[in-house]
Image (cartoon, rainbow, N blue to C red):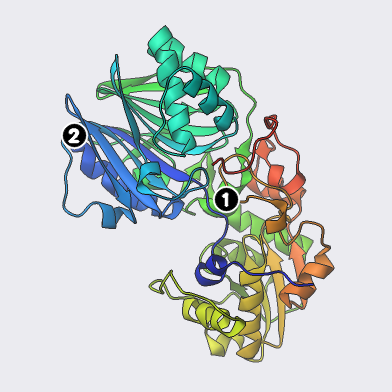
Amino acid sequence: MDFLPRESDIITGQKPSEECAVVGYTGSDAFTTINFSLRALQHRGQESSGIATFDGKIHVTKGMGLVSEVFRGEILPGRIGIGHNRYSTAGSKGVENAGPFVISSSLGYIGISHNGEITNAHDLRERLKEKGYIFYSSSDTEVLLTEIVSEIGKYGIIDGIKKAMLKIKGAYALAILINDVLYALRDPFGFRPLILGKTEGGYIISSESAAIDTVSGEVIRDIAPGELVEIRESGYRSVFTVEHKTAHCMFEYVYFARPDSIIDKREVFDVRYNIGIKLAKENPVDADVVVPVPDSGRSQALGYSVYSNIPYSEGLIKNRYSDRTFILPDQKSRYDAIKIKLNTIKSVINGRRVVLVDDSIVRGNTMRHIINILRKDGATEVHVRVGSPPIIAPCYFGVDMKTSSDFIAGGHTIEEIRKAINADSLGYLTIKGLRESIGMDNLCVGCLTGNYPDEIPQGAKPNYT
């Protein structure tokens, strides 16, 4: 059995990525606050970044690359704005798909930063084109914005947004800028996080609480599923909350979010630590050292170590400055590439039975190469423990997991996967263990079961293009 590696996976150790980070702010020094917040959320998207501010007219700067690469000494005027970091799961790569998206309408300027994915974007786009709307990108965010603008033009801001929500399917956490007013909107399932905070100079909304901490703010609360919140410098109010059925994305806790973030009242580090404990209960092994796959496996590995009483140690070191654009013509090149990205601490590995803990396995290619490196550098046994259940189905709600052929767990037994990645043993967390570790039942686990919390429109494809 052979699982062919994707070059990007081998080089970056890349897990599935989620579409974006969103930020909105109203108060003093909006641009600087948004800039710092986006830097704190860089892990949620490294493809492009953008900021839009308003001071009577709209100012927009966006470009390809990291936040620090896009904004080099530039400051946009205005006391209100929105920001966006993008990882493309919907639409092609290119600056035309970078957020925020802004439209000039009869009500003035309307801008949106979007985290998530719209499952019926194709149908909405075709209907809007029939009405005469023109699209300049392949992003579902532009479709989302155009639909909202269309309904606002007919019914006004509040009723228009509510009408648009009845037509839009899928995942969306939005920072919406309408002239000098900021709105926060979360889809009725609450797939993606969105958090409201207070700073010394104003109010902020963000994909994660860590960004609010970064600008010395204080978290007020999570935006509720289906809720629209209006935010001004003078204060905020909940405008409405539509009927909803909560289904938070489990991958936020397993992988995406920073461990120091608190999302829907759950601290991410605590969840991952609990996952490690549960993983050790469900999958014990006799070994000498617990080693995490950096960086996202650390919290789980610590929990595993504490419960199992097997010492924890950093046995793999990540090179944070390795090139992201290798050409990989053969197996040796792929092996050399991951050696540039990850290297062992030989005194920890050599002659030891290693428990290797990672947050998830999707395609299995990177894991196989890491195990081979550990064996080459002296590990006598490598026992893999995975802090999420096997991923077997595509995601339609903003995670870059496109087709079942991407998943090593699809159609293969755990024993077959163990052999494919060259491990001595392999153990996954159960879905029951995952729910207990997160501490909530209202989760989206569609990628683990193939059963989704919302109906998927006929003909919809993961990662709309």
Q: Position of residue 296 (x, y in %)?
A: 54, 62
Question: Which quadrant of the view contains residue 411?
Answer: bottom right
Does residue 310 appear left or right of residue 100 in this picture? Answer: right
* Mark 2: few/some/many CA within 10 Å (<14, 14-19, 20+): some
Q: Earlier in the sequence, mark 1 or mark 2?
A: 2
Does residue 289 appear left or right of residue 60 in this picture? Answer: right
* Mark 1: few/some/many CA within 10 Å (<14, 14-19, 20+): many
Residue type at mark 1: give it.
Asp
Q: What label sits on residue 56 in the rendered view?
A: none
Question: Which quadrant of the view contains residue 273?
Answer: bottom right
Q: What label sits on residue 400 in the rendered view?
A: 1
Q: In which quarter of the image is the C terminus?
A: top right
Q: Position of residue 338 (x, y in %)?
A: 53, 77
**In this orientation, which residue lies closer to the viewer: 424 or 291?**
424
Q: Going 57% across and 44% down the picture, which residue do you hit?
A: 463
Q: Up-down: is 94 above or below 58?
A: below
Q: Up-down: is 219 above or below 133?
A: below
- How many numbered discs, if any? 2
Q: In which quarter of the image is the N terminus?
A: bottom right
**In this orientation, which residue lies closer to the viewer: 101 or 441?**
101
| Residue that carries the numbered disc 2 in the rendered image | 28
